[in-house]
Amino acid sequence: MLYEFARPFLFALDAETAHDLTLASLRTAQALHLPVACAVSAGKPVRVMGLDFPNRIGLAAGLDKNGECIEGLAALGFGHVEIGTVTPRPQPGNPKPRLFRLPLRQAIINRMGFNNHGVDALVANVRRSAYKGILGINIGKNFDTPIERAVDDYLACLRKVYPHAGYVTANISSPNTSNLRQLQGAAELDGLLGPLKQEQEALAQQHGRHVPLALKIAPDLDGTQIQVIADALRRHRIEAAIATNTTISREGVEHLAHGDEAGGLSGEPVFDKSTTVLGALSRALGNEIPLIGVGGVMNGNSARTKLEAGAQLVQLYTGLIYRGPALVREAIEATRDF
């Protein structure tokens, strides 16, 4: 109910200003131990990647890039929280403006460009957090790291976040880092996933615990590309895939204000495309590897549709901007009996 009153004020602000204000408010509530949600549904526990999730609904990466509001966001009822994307070194991201609302389609276009404070700052924030739930940490490469050396950045991040993560996601699908999506090719996947898996095994020995690896893919893939990714996931024994990131398509928003902005499109317009990729990947994998469905989850029915398409968990982000915490409760209820 509170969000219904706050939303008109937030939407009157520039999108990134509203984003920053929301995170600042959550940090304040977190620091003062104030409640940020009430009457949250507990949901039904589910085991995925060898981890016990209290419900199937999680927060997608991108909202809390630096791990500054983990407790405040978890209090909204999420069964897991994914933070990041984080890079080895701090970077400012792309020039502003870089975040745009398309309210008529409940959509957002962003070209943030992995703006974050760097992996050391994120780890420090996670250390300070009292959150005891499942924390995903999403890792990427710095914008100025050549694509042929991208694996070095992913390995550097993996080593630092491993002791603090419930699972780690390698993000190779953001459209806002030059050439990043090249890593979805067959040879590039082998060059990335092989070393990551080898390092994961070494870190498991070092820390005495196994932290699953997930791969986040794009919605702009054809059947051949999806099969290539499925084969690589099997070959390297990656524990999960997240389908999908934002799309570079502008279908359905071409004539809207800001519809022609560069960046990744999220929200309702990406739902069909991301769910199609999710379903195709599920069929290609034959239930061998768990999937996390994300993209255009705007209500309980769309969360359930992701599960019907083959996902074991569902994440949301843009829907939270438009619907507020009520969406979390609705999605948990809609997926409780799945």
Image: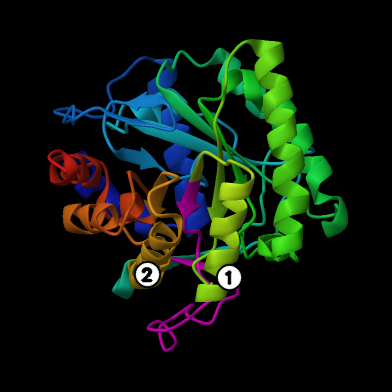
53 lies left or right of 155 = left
Q: Residue furthest bottom?
A: 255
Res 169 → quadrant: top right
Q: Residue at x 36, y 58 (%)?
A: 11
Res 282 → quadrant: bottom left
Disc 1 packing (10 Å; few <14; some 14–19; many ≥20): some
Residue picked out by circle 1: 225
Q: Magenta segment: does it hold 12?
A: no
Q: Which mark sits nearer the N-terminus, 1 or 2? A: 1
Where residue 149 sits in the image (x, y, percent)? 86, 51
- Residue 338 visible in image: yes
How is colour applied across the structure in the image? rainbow
**Front position in the image: 35 or 221:** 221
Residue picked out by circle 2: 276
Q: Would you place residue 173 above or below residue 164 in this image?
A: below
Q: Which residues are magenta?
A: 241-266
- Residue 120 visible in image: no
User: Which mark identifies residue 3?
Assistant: none
Q: Magenta segment: does it hold 262?
A: yes
Q: Which secondary structure is most common in the magenta stretch?
A: loop
- Disc 2 secondary structure class: helix
